[in-house]
């Protein structure tokens, strides 16, 4: 399975898709679903949805993951052709300097670089200062505002880190937008595994605008009315010295479930998973002899936080894969964890019984 996941992940990482501009990612995924013969549709916000009809006596399930990535929007083009931007999503400003970017213009993609002041010219104070996103300038080499605009760049143009894939030793992949193109690849693998199988009605959703405001998946869910929602995303790997006090999530140690997430920065939102789904994942992992890691984190948030609150409430759980270096240009995951995640979800779907009790009483 890892060979297929590797090919799909590498292809997905090569496609730019800033929040609100996920069309190219969706087109690539739609082509795979069409080749699989799995009917699919896109809603007005851009969510890509494929439904596999199942037993109406079983609770319906929505499994989703986001297509978008973080980045920037152009906010001003200077007379000298240098470009100023606003940050979109949780861009790590410590990781911006001297990075290559791709500007997705009206006439095609344009390469640029985030400028970095020459080390020999920086003052002692500047050497330890991190620039904020509004302070940086992007150089495309055009040399004037007129030339930049003639190349199809204007205010509002999406900007992402230049797509890159780094194949590390063994089954590890690093580069841009592993968050959450790895989840997209895993969900596509699950679609291939479930086609033609019996089970609950299954809605597969590749969602939009997670990095922007975490609300895209809610639009799909309010129309699909699932009884159960399972969200796929990264889980912070804590097996490096700088993260060791944050938990016990190990890359290569298998898929994980979140037992608690809370953003804690204004949203006052997070997910405490439904106990029946925690049991389902634990029992499935035991039955398949799969390792199952556990996460409990403050400072993280997924779009499941909003999906769970729709209608009468949706039984929810976050599942995922360990990832290092989140929101940088060298995000890193292990394909074995992705393969284990697909097996876990596939097995869990097979274990959902008719009339599964979801009320918390």
Image (cartoon, rainbow, N blue to C red):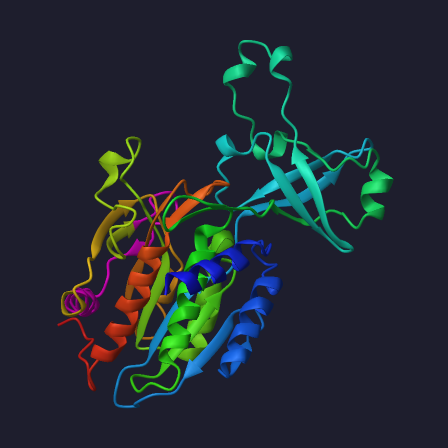
Q: Does residue 144 lie above or below 36 as drawn? A: above
- Image point (56%, 30%), residue name: 132
- Image point (34%, 84%), residue name: 201
- The residue sitting at the top extreme is 124
Residue 194, how many percent across, how many down? 36, 79
Quadrant where the N terminus sits is bottom left
Is residue 351 something that shows in the picture? yes
Horizontal arrangement in the rendering, residue 210 relative to residue 287 (left or right): right
Horizontal arrangement in the rendering, residue 145 relative to residue 51 (left or right): right
Q: On the image, which quarter does residue 195 sit in? A: bottom left
Residue 235, how many percent across, how many down? 32, 50
Quadrant where the C terminus sits is bottom left
Q: Is residue 279 magenta?
A: yes
Q: Is residue 220 magenta?
A: no
- Image point (64%, 20%), residue name: 117
Q: Which residues are magenta?
A: 262-285
Residue 38, how many percent across, how many down? 48, 82
Q: On the image, which quarter does residue 79 sit in? A: top right
Q: Foreground: 92 or 226?
A: 92
């Amino acid at each position: 399975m890892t060979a297929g996941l590797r090919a799909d992940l590498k292809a997905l990482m090569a496609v730019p898709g800033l929040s609100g501009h996920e069309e190219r990612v969706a087109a690539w995924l739609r082509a795979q679903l069409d080749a699989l013969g799995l009917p699919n549709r896109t809603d007005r916000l851009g969510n890509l949805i494929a439904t596999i009809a199942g037993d109406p006596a079983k609770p319906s399930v929505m499994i989703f993951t986001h297509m978008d990535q973080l980045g920037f929007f152009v906010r001003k083009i200077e007379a000298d052709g240098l470009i100023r931007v606003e940050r979109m999503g949780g861009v790590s400003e410590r990781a911006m300097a001297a990075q290559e970017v791709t500007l997705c213009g009206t006439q095609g993609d344009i390469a640029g670089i985030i400028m970095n002041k020459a080390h020999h010219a920086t003052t002692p104070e500047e050497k330890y200062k991190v620039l904020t996103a509004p302070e940086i300038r992007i150089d495309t080499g055009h040399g004037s505002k007129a030339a930049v605009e003639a190349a199809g760049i204007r205010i509002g143009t999406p900007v992402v880190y230049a797509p890159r894939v780094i194949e590390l030793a063994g089954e590890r992949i690093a580069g841009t937008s592993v968050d959450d193109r790895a989840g997209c690849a895993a969900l596509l693998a699950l679609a291939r595994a479930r086609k033609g199988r019996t089970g609950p009605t299954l809605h597969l959703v590749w969602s939009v605008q997670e990095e922007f405001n975490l609300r895209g998946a809610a639009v799909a869910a309010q129309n699909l009315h699932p009884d159960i929602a399972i969200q796929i995303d990264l889980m912070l790997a804590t097996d490096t010295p700088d993260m060791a006090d944050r938990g016990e999530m190990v890359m290569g140690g298998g898929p994980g479930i979140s037992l608690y997430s809370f953003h804690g920065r204004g949203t006052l939102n997070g997910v405490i998973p439904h106990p029946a789904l925690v049991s389902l994942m634990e029992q499935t992992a035991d039955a398949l002899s799969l390792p199952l890691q556990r996460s409990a984190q403050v400072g993280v948030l997924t779009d499941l936080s909003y999906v769970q609150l729709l209608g009468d409430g949706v039984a929810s759980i976050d599942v995922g894969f360990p990832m290092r270096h989140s929101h940088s240009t060298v995000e890193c995951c292990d394909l074995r964890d992705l393969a284990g995640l697909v097996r876990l979800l596939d097995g869990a779907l097979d274990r959902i019984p008719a009339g599964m009790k979801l009320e918390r009483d």
